Image: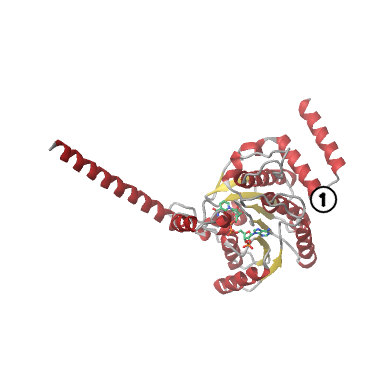
C-alpha cells in the first residue's frame, strides 16, 4: 500500500514538474518571441537629408536596422560583401518602406583592400555620412581561417575591417557632425581580453575566444574613438542586441541534429526587429548625444567592463591596429607607446 502511495506521489510530482517546466519554457518563449520585456525604441526622429551606412545590411540585425533607418527618410548605403544578396535585400527593403533612396556597395571586411576601395568610393561620391553602423560580423568559425592580410577571420571582419573603415570615413563623419559611429557589440567582450602575443591565434585557435576577443577589441576601439573624437560632434556607441535569431550561428549548425535543436531554440530568441531596437536607439536618440563610448543594452546605457577599462592595453591595441591597417608607421607607433609606458610609470 505504502509503495503504491509513494509511486502515485512520485508520478504526480513528475507530472507537476513537467507541467511547470513546460509553462516556464512557454512563458519564456512567448516573452522572447513577442519581445515582452524587450525594449522597443519609440523615438520618431526623421533622417531626411542624412546619409546612413549599414555594413552587413543584407541579413539579420543589419537588415532590420537598415529597413527602419530607410523608413525614416534618409539615404541608405547597404555595405555588403555579396552584391547579389544585397540587391535582393534592397528590393525587399524598398518594398517594405516604399522608399527608394538606397544603394548597394560592395564591402568585404575580410580584405583591407576592399575596405579601402569602398571608403574611397564613398568619399568621392557621397556628400556626407551621418551614421555609420559597423554591424557586419562572423561568429564560431570552427577552423582558423587567415585572411589575405594575415588576420584571423573573426579579428578581420569584426574588428580590423571596421577599424580601418571608420578611420577612412572620419573626415566625412566630422564634416557631417553631429554624426555617430555605431559598433554592434556582444556581451562576450566583457570576459575576453586581447592576447598581444597572439592577436591572430597563430599559436592556438579557439572559435569562441576568437569571437569574444574580436568584440573586446571593438569595445576598446569604441571607447578609444570616443576619447579621440571628444568635442568633434562625432560620437560612438556599442549596442548589444541580445540573443537574436539570425544567420550568425551558421558556422555552428553543422549537423542535422544541431539544425533541429536550433529550429527549436531559435523560437526562444529575439527576432531581428527586436534585436535592432538598441542599435536604433544608439543611432537616433538625441538624448544620448553626450554619452559617447559606452555599451548599451535594452536601450539603456551600461558601463564599460573588462580589459576595455585599462588604458595601456587600449592604447597598445589602438597603435597596433593603426600599424597593421597601414594607417601609421610602425617605428612612430612604437615610440609613442614607449613614451606612454614611461609616463604611466612616473
Ligand atoms: N545574433 C545575435 O544573437 C547577436 C548577439 C550579439 C551581437 N550580435 C552582432 O550583431 C551583428 C550582426 O549579426 P547578425 O546576428 O545579424 O548575423 P547575420 O544575420 O549573420 O548578419 C551578419 C552580416 O555580416 C555580413 N558579413 C559577414 N562577413 C562579412 C565580410 N567579410 N564582409 C562584409 N560583411 C560580412 C554577412 O554577410 P553575408 O550574408 O554575405 O554572410 C551579414 O550580412 C554582428 O556584429 C554580431 O556579432 C549578434
What is the quadrant of residue 59 in the picture?
Answer: bottom right
Closer to the camera in the image, 254 or 290: 254
Where residue 128 appears, x then y in whole percent? 74, 63
Q: In the picture, residue 75 is in which quadrant? A: bottom right
Q: Quadrant of the C terminus?
A: top right
Q: Residue shown at 76%/50% (left/top)?
A: 150
Q: Residue furthest top?
A: 346
Residue 139 in picture, x, y percent from top left: 60, 52
In the image, the residue with mark 1 has its CB under 8 Å from the nearest atom of ligand 1:
no
Residue nearest the viewer, comparing 198 with 118: 198
- Image-quadrant location for residue 254: bottom right
Q: Position of residue 327 (x, y in %)?
A: 82, 50
SS label for mark 1: loop
Asked if residue 198 is positioned above or below residue 80 in the image, the reply reads above
Q: Dot 1 surroundings within 10 Å: few (below 14), some, or many (20 or more)?
A: few
Q: How is colour applied across the structure in the image?
A: secondary structure
Q: Up-down: is 96 above or below 63?
A: below
Q: How many marks?
A: 1
Query: Is 240 or 256 nearer to us in this picture?
Result: 256
Answer left or right for 339 relative to 283.
right
Residue beneath disc 1 = 326
Image quadrant occupied by the N terminus: top left
Quarter of the picture for ligand 1?
bottom right
The residue shown at (57%, 43%) is 302
Q: Position of residue 267 (x, y in %)?
A: 44, 57
Residue closest to the far left: 1
Amino acid at each position: 500500500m505504502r509503495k503504491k502511495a509513494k509511486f502515485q506521489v512520485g508520478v504526480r510530482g513528475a507530472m507537476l514538474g513537467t507541467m511547470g517546466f513546460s509553462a516556464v519554457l512557454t512563458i519564456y518563449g512567448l516573452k522572447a518571441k513577442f519581445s515582452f520585456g524587450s525594449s522597443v525604441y519609440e523615438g520618431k526622429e526623421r533622417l531626411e537629408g542624412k546619409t546612413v551606412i549599414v555594413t552587413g545590411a543584407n541579413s539579420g540585425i543589419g537588415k532590420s536596422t537598415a529597413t527602419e533607418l530607410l523608413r525614416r527618410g534618409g539615404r541608405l548605403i547597404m555595405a555588403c560583401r555579396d552584391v547579389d544578396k544585397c540587391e535582393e535585400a534592397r528590393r525587399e527593403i524598398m518594398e517594405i518602406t516604399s522608399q527608394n533612396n538606397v544603394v548597394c556597395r560592395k564591402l568585404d571586411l575580410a580584405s583591407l583592400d576592399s575596405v579601402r576601395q569602398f571608403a574611397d568610393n564613398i568619399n568621392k561620391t557621397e556628400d556626407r555620412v551621418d551614421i555609420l553602423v559597423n554591424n557586419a560580423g562572423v561568429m564560431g568559425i570552427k577552423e582558423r581561417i587567415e585572411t589575405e592580410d594575415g588576420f584571423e577571420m573573426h579579428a578581420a571582419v569584426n574588428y580590423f575591417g571596421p577599424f580601418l573603415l571608420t578611420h577612412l570615413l572620419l573626415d566625412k563623419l566630422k564634416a557631417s557632425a553631429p554624426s555617430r559611429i555605431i559598433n554592434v557589440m556582444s556581451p562576450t567582450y566583457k570576459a575576453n581580453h586581447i592576447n598581444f602575443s597572439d592577436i591572430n591565434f597563430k599559436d592556438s585557435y579557439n572559435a569562441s575566444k576568437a569571437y569574444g576577443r574580436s568584440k573586446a577589441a571593438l569595445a576598446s576601439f569604441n571607447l578609444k574613438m570616443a576619447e579621440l573624437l571628444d568635442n568633434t560632434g562625432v560620437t560612438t556607441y556599442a549596442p548589444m542586441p541580445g540573443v537574436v535569431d539570425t544567420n550568425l550561428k551558421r558556422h555552428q549548425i553543422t549537423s542535422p541534429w544541431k539544425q533541429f535543436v536550433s529550429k527549436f531554440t531559435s523560437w526562444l530568441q529575439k527576432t531581428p526587429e527586436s534585436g535592432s531596437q538598441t542599435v536604433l536607439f544608439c543611432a537616433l536618440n538625441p538624448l544620448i548625444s553626450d554619452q559617447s563610448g559606452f555599451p548599451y543594452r535594452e536601450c539603456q546605457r551600461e558601463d564599460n567592463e573588462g580589459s576595455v577599462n585599462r588604458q595601456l592595453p587600449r592604447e597598445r591595441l589602438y597603435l597596433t591596429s593603426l600599424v597593421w591597417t597601414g594607417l601609421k608607421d610602425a617605428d612612430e607607433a612604437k615610440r609613442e607607446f614607449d613614451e606612454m609606458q614611461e609616463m604611466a610609470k612616473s
